[in-house]
Amino acid sequence: MKNPDAIVIGAGIVGATVALSLTNAGLQVLIVDRGPVSSGTTGAGEGNILVSDKEPGPELTLALRSRDLWFDLQDDVGDCFELEAKGGVVVARRDPEPLFHLAKKQEQCGVLIQKLDNYAVHELEPYIHPEIEHGILYSQDAQCQPMLAAAHVIRAVVNRGGKFIAGAEVQRILHHNGSVSGIETTQGSFSTKIVVNAAGTWAGNIAERAGSQLPIAPRKGFILVTEPVNKYIFHKVYDSDYVANVASSDADLQTSTVVEGTQSGTILIGASRQRVGFDTTMNYEIVRRLAAQATSLFPILRDVQLLRIYSGFRPYAPDHLPVIGEDAQVNGLWHSAGHEGAGIGLAPGSAQLLTDRILARDTFMDAEPFSPKRFQSSLTQLRSAI
Amino acid sequence: MKTNTYVIFNGNSIPFNEGESVAAALLRSGEESLRETRFHGKPRAIFCGIGVCFDCVVAIDGVPNQRACIIECREGMKIESRP
């Protein structure tokens, strides 16, 4: 396949889903990645498919659509990536009013909520700390195993005539007269008119290789993994502080409590946010803090062993919105990146949106808020001035 | 070297040498599987041998998920395979 219709850079969930929707639209697609499947951003993901942590706005619209598309994706490629509509429970440890206020605003946008008052949360989560009184149930929140999902979606692309090359690092994105003509990789050159940059946290580097730019920066997070245990935690449970942390632009460390069980029996504990570049150093202070917060929410976890701890980098855009759309300078170069901590959940929706834009079809929502041009306009103006 | 000391593995007496890990004693006695996986019932035993991979976990004196490779045998210790 020397001349695919489209080339997707990045074999994480964002690249995999866009490759599949382009394939299903009849294009012959080549996926390249410098490593194997899910070796970057997706591989460190927790598998969150959330509507609960989004404020009303374009990201919530995308999240609601994307959440449903996850189940369509399962119908398309099979029940093989632990997709589970487990629901999310957000609890307020202190004043519940901010949480209730947010939930009301979300409800007006189509989010299904159920107010959990008067200790009703204990019927859903019997092991939660006895003093927790208020919460909201978000029944649309779901979870998947993102690495498995990316692998199975890429397998579907290959079975339908596409191709995946692992270990092919993109060196240059070629363009003539402002339009994409192909890519050069460590495993050869390929001609195409459409390139999709789905390189996650490294999407800025890929943009540079086309002579463009994209301000995606890493936002580090740790996840603690426990030994497999009996089912103690039935939903994705998190502290209402999490929403504020997600929306914050502070570079300093922030932690909030996020706890959930997985189908394999392990419990995942997060979440920390820190802007420290691509620093992979272990930080036991953060681990201690996350563990302490988790045990304060679920005291039963005090007797559960940790198996391992890992960290990863969320692809962070300065305004916390993903970048989905065509490059301002290079025609035929499309970006789908910068989803921060929501990339798993937003992947199928982003894929649909980008595919519809690439094929000039009607889109299910206005894609303008996600346009890369919002970061690139000053550069474009500068170039046209020259 | 004392050789008349035993641990109990799934009800059977297994001899051990002083200072030996649970995994080492069991392996030396020909126990090739320490447990079976939860979902597919596949055998699991010592893999990394240094306490990192958690593949060799057994229940020791009733406490589950103990790493056989880094725990020393003690006389009369009761070891059980658990998924």
Image (spheres, coloured by chain):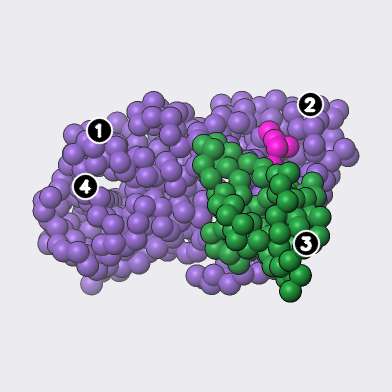
Chain colours: A purple, B green
Q: Position of residue A162 (x, y in %)?
A: 21, 43
Please state which of the two labelled residues, at mark 4 or mark 3, is closer to the viewer.
Answer: 3
The quarter in which the C terminus of chain A is drawn is bottom left
Dot 1 and dot 2 residues touching (CB under 8 Å): no
Please state which of the two labelled residues, at mark 2 or mark 3, is closer to the viewer.
Answer: 3
Q: Which residue is mark 4?
A: A163
Q: Relative to B45, does residue A175 appear above or below in the rendering?
A: below
Question: Who comes first in sequence, dot 4 or dot 2?
Answer: 2
- Foreground residue among A23 and A229: A229
Q: Identify which residue is drawn at 53% across, 59% down.
A: B47
Q: Which residue is mark 1?
A: A24
Q: Which residue is mark 3?
A: B5
Q: Position of residue A361 (x, y in %)?
A: 26, 33
Q: Which residue is mark 2?
A: A123
Subunit under mark 3: B
Outermost residue to the right: A131
Q: Which residues are magenta?
A: A229-234
Alpha carbon separation for disc pair 1 and 2: 43 Å
> Is residue A366 highlighted in magenta?
no
